[in-house]
Amino acid sequence: MSISIRRAAVAALVAAGVLLLANWFDAGVVADAKIRAGSTYDSGPLMNAVVLARLLTAAGVVAV
């Protein structure tokens, strides 16, 4: 019984870690790329960040 509780705790920690990583990436990296794209009119880095954010979100869903 303790092994299943341990597995559930590890799964919950991994899920929380993935969600925190996705939140940091979205709130920090993508938001900064949006600001830079707005000031320089260069949307290349923003598009790369959005693609990475979507891949990170998909990987998080699969991991959870």
Image (cartoon, rainbow, N blue to C red):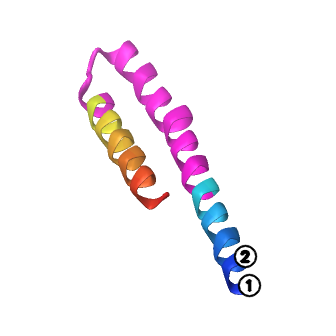
Residue shown at the point (60%, 67%) measured from the top left? 11
Residue at the (64%, 76%) spot, across then down? 7
* Image: magenta residue range: 17-46
Q: Which residue is mark 1?
A: 1
Cα separation between marks 2 and 1: 7 Å
Residue 52 rendering spot, x and y as whole percentages: 33, 44
Q: Nearer the viewer, residue 41 or 10?
A: 10
Asked whether the beta carbons under mark 2 and mark 1 sit within 8 Å of each other, the answer is: yes
Q: Which mark is residue 19?
A: none
Q: Position of residue 48 (x, y in %)?
A: 28, 37
Callout 1, which amino acid?
A: Met
Q: Main secondary structure of the magenta part?
A: helix
Whether residue 43 appears in magenta in the rendering, the answer is yes
- Label 2 Cα crowd, 10 Å radius (few <14 / some 14-19 / many 20+): few
Residue type highlighted by circle 2 = Ile
> Which residue is found at the position 57% from the left and 42% from the top?
24
Q: Is residue 63 left or right of residue 10?
A: left
Describe residue 22's horizontal placement relative to residue 2 as left or right.
Answer: left
- Kindly identify which numbered label has been placed on residue 5: 2
Q: Secondary structure at mark 2?
A: helix
Residue 27, position as x, y percentages in the image: 55, 33
Q: Is residue 5 above or below residue 59?
A: below
- Measured as percent of width and height from the top left, residue 50 is found at 34, 34
Is residue 9 or residue 14 the one in the foreground?
9
